[in-house]
Image: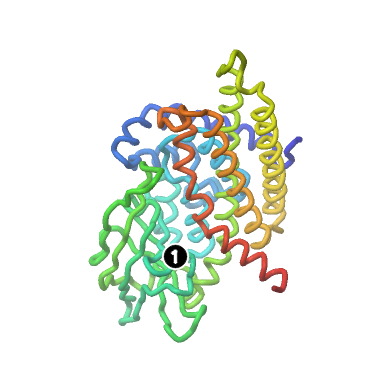
Amino acid sequence: MKKRAYEAEHKAFRETVRQFIERELQPHAQRWEAEGIVDRSAFVAAGKYGLVGFNIPEEFGGGGVNDFRFNAVIDEELARYGGPSPGLSLVNDVVGPYFTSLCNDEQSKRWLPGIARGETILAVAMSEPGAGSDLAGIRTSAVRDGDDWVIDGNKTFISSGINADLVVVVCRTDPDAGHKGFTLLVVERGMAGFIRGRKLHKMGLGYQDTAELTFDSVRVPVSNVLGQEGRGFYHLMHNLPSERLSIAISGVATAREAWRQTLQYAKDRHAFGQPIGSFQHNRFLLAELDTELEIAEQYLDRCLLAVVEGELTAVEAAKAKWWCTEVALKVIDRCVQLHGGYGYMMEYRVARDYVDNRILTILGGSTEIMKEIIGRDLGL
């Protein structure tokens, strides 16, 4: 079924992304995998290809294009590639929008040019050891002291935590104000008391620098408040739908590639004198997976059109996030099964996809949280 969201300019942009992957990522993939981190130079290369900061205003060195379909193209192509890559979705889809929408004039001049060039790497510090998806449980505090805020606390599961130059830290600035007591503060590389802990050893995505961060009386100038004091929770809620849509898009694109490779494997691999895909069970299973992926892809296509029209709701994004990521994990799991023993070997991409993508139903809000959002919208 034809997708309607993408236009000619997005198709041309897709070719640029593929060239970037072929020339700038694939030659270094094996080394990055072994070292467990992607070089900072990969972000700079992405900036030269126009893959970072294309939604930053032109006056600050960006492309001046606020069209989430370009974000989606990058997400899809990196997912189909499936190898070590810089966290472009984190910059473009998750953290970058906080800067483009909340920076004042002084902050824009100070931060946006470096982001657009890929020289300034971003992270957002929300999750804590005792909070997880429960943002209301955040304990990291910031206390006003003259012209500074003093931050104390710990964050965990922070993507780009090692490489990041600017970290948007979600802090509790008024313990008695509930949701109105959070503020976003930008901590910069080199600030006293800003400690990067260990790089976390994860089930998959070993090349991604996920880290623990500690803030030990870090003094942050008032000029580093992002958005409005006391409005941090609402700023986060405004941007979460695009993050969740991005995760859904990446998951389905990864699963589609796993399905494609498994379909070919089912045609090439023989057992009992015939291709394994010719057995009715396997044929039916591949048909089932293709159908579920097609339905997910069509819903995402509708979501992209809704974003362009400014109509995508938090509930619709939650539906996309939980459904598409659950479908993606189901598809990849079945593809491992169809590969038999080879599906358990890490030299086969389907095995790497299995461990790398298990985080999909947890990252950006778990499936259970997404259902809670939808359920509350039903008045339950």
Foreground: 318 or 181? Answer: 318
Residue density around tag 1, few if under 14, some if 14–19, many if 20 or more, within 10 Å: some
Q: Position of residue 273 (x, y in %)?
A: 60, 13
- Where residue 252 sits: x, y (%)? 60, 42
The quadrant where residue 274 appears: top right
Amino acid found under the numbered disc labelled 1: Gly
Res 167 → quadrant: bottom left
Say if 235 sits above or below 361 in the image.
below
Q: How is the image coloured?
A: rainbow
Task: Name the residue carrying label 1.
Answer: 132
- Number of callouts: 1
**For numbered disc 1, what is the local secondary structure?**
loop
Toward which corner of the image does residue 330 lie, by quadrant? top right
Image coordinates for residue 118, horizontal then vertical, percent: 41, 45
Direction right: furthest residue = 1
Relative side of 312 to 119, left or right:
right
Q: Which residue is the extreme one toward the left?
A: 192
- Seen from this angle, which residue lies furthest bottom? 176
Residue farthest top in this picture: 273
State the residue at coordinates (66%, 24%): 279
Where is residue 114 drawn, in percent x and y? 40, 50
Specify the quadrant that holds the C terminus: bottom right
The residue at the point 60 percent across, 52 percent down is: 245
**If the image is split into quadrants, where does the N terminus sit?**
top right
| Frontmost residue, 115 versus 278 | 278
122 left or right, relative to 339: left
